[in-house]
Amino acid sequence: MSDVLALQGVSKRYGSQVAVDALDLTLRRAEFLTLLGPSGSGKTTTLMMVAGLQRPDTGTIRLNGASVGDLPPYRRDIGMVFQHYALFPHMTVRRNVGFPLEMRRLPREEIAKLVEEVLELVRLPGLGDRLPKELSGGQQQRVALARALVYRPALLLMDEPLGALDRKLREQLQLEIKRVHRERGISVLYVTHDQEEALTMSDRIAVFDRGRIQQIGTPEELYDRPSTRFVASFIGDTNLVSGRAISTAEGVCEVETPAGRVRASVRQRIAAGTSVVVAVRPERVSLASEGEGLGGSVTDVIFVGTARKYAVRLDDGTECFVLRQVGSAPIGGAGTKVRLSWEATHAIAFEA
Amino acid sequence: MRGDGMGAWRLLRAVMCCIVAAWLLAPLVVVVVISFSSAPFLQFPPPGFSLRWYVQLFSTPAWTNSLLVSVQIMVPAALFATILGTAASYALVRGGVPGARLVMACLMLPIVVPGMITAAALFGVYRGLGLNGTLTGLIIGHTVLCLPYVVATVTSALRVQDARLEDAAATLGAPPWAAFRHITLPLVLPAVLSSLLVAMILTFDELIVSLFVSSARVRPVAVQMWSNLLGDFDPTISAIASVCFLLALLVLLADLALRAGKSSRIA
């Protein structure tokens, strides 16, 4: 069995509120799997149940093939990094990191050696004698990471570990965590509500909404082929245009909107006459001054470095964004009439 | 103008503080001064100074015995109250005990209920158990009286500690007892020690319960002072009062040192 973690039919409710609803999930060895979703979608509850800090109402959780449902956290072979670090304030960095080894009754010299090694890994050598409060937020989170890694647990759980850090530091630590993941070959279950972070770091992403997994797949799959409207709008920037299906053929559906006709691919048959929403990424939209597609007018042009972002109001009032590489043929500024079009394979229609 | 006004207020405030301090301290000063008096009765200011009342105090078996009894009560009662109170606090704050608020309220009762009633109740219960007039009875009674102070101090210290630290310890492989011993207890230790000291002062000074459940043979110092005051008394009473005062002062200083140490170690 190469799955490190397997959840089967796991549910958890708080009173009448269903936090996690009949969840199935597997994590492969050395995989970086992210649970992504808005707050209250059940991702943290799922993580807490894997850690043993919450008990599922139903279902089984297997770690390395063995059911851990009845095991308390301290008997599960897991490491956990918390959002607010949860470092022990009365212990030095070295004792914090050595704590799990102390609990495992390793000999003193061995502890000292392993602690130095892991502090090296998270790039914190020489800070072993400091107290947590003497470190910056980023350094504290590295200590927390080192502490959760030092005993080589089968699975590393991370609960929004970068949530309390500023953007710059967050991006830097994302890369660091990825590097540690690669170098140690550990299996990681990561929770975040930040879709960019999920796209950057994950091998696979499970998108959560209201206690259920909406879609699970690689970042590319989720970005290019979202299976629900929620996933399409939660991951990356998406334009959503409402209309009515007028015909479908070979996985492509023609959609009539008040602003014009467009084509989009469909995942399942959609009957003619159904109300649909077409999702399309800003960088997949072509802008032209005339021709087919949807009519609208430019309301704003924003320079974002490598590209220009056009805000367009369609004739039916829908707001859209179009991303064009700097250097492509210029289009006028605010007020210019434009036509928006795209390849049918780059847009997806969902039943509204 | 404005500066002058502030100055006047500050002056007034300083004067007020001095008056309050004098009001509180003057009786103590008088007692301590009289304990060094050479006169055979309470007289202030004393006509001369001597140590005769201290000699008297430490050579009278009634006094020395009662001091010993008080210490024999104080040490175990303060320790039991601290241990039980800390355990109860941990269970009430972290344990998810059903009806924790109610249990907490019950533990606080000895502060709320008038001392006379607690004392009478203990007396009644002890009569059936044969505990009246015994050291054991006094220790149990004083433990009950000290418990609420320990629980109040330790629960508030536990509430400000992040419960996540215990979760973290658990995920790192620490069973509950190890997590308590290595993480929670060291973090609330200043509060625990502080409540131990407060408990010591409380039992040493306690009179009402002691009056009810003590006997001529097992008589704590507060009861001995009380009965001495009811009869003919001489400045020995101010000598013993000064000794008690000194003890309380030492405990308070220890507590102060403890708090200073705590605030410099854990920001």
Image (tube, coloured by chain):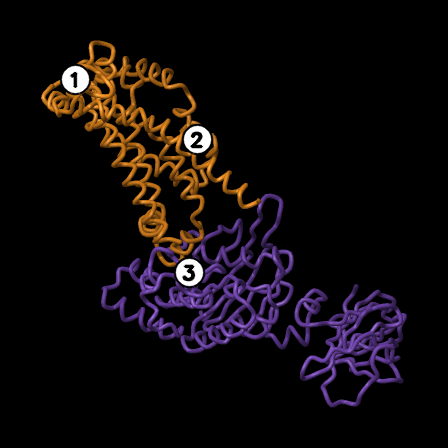
Chain colours: A purple, B orange
Mark 2–mark 1 contact, CB under 8 Å? no
In x, y percent, where is residue A26?
52, 66
In x, y percent, where is residue A68?
43, 56
**Which secondary structure, mark 2?**
helix
Mark 3–mark 2 contact, CB under 8 Å? no
Quote the CA–CA distance across marks 3 and 2.
40 Å
Q: Write down the chain letter for disc 3.
A: A
Quote the CA–CA distance across marks 3 and 1.
86 Å
In this figure, which residue is indicated by the disc labeled 3? A66
Foreground of the two, B93 or A191: B93
Q: Of tags 3 and 2, which is closer to the observer?
A: 2
Foreground of the two, A48 or B71: B71
| Residue type marked 1 | Ala
- Image check: A7 left or right of A103? right
In this figure, which residue is indicated by the disc labeled 2? B103
Residue at horizontal 48 percent and vertical 64 percent from the top: A158
User: Badge 1: how crowded within 10 Å, few (<14), some, or many (20+)?
Assistant: some
- Marks 3/2 same chain: no
Q: Quadrant of residue A87?
A: bottom left
Q: Write down the chain letter for disc 2.
A: B
User: Badge 2: how crowded within 10 Å, few (<14), some, or many (20+)?
Assistant: few
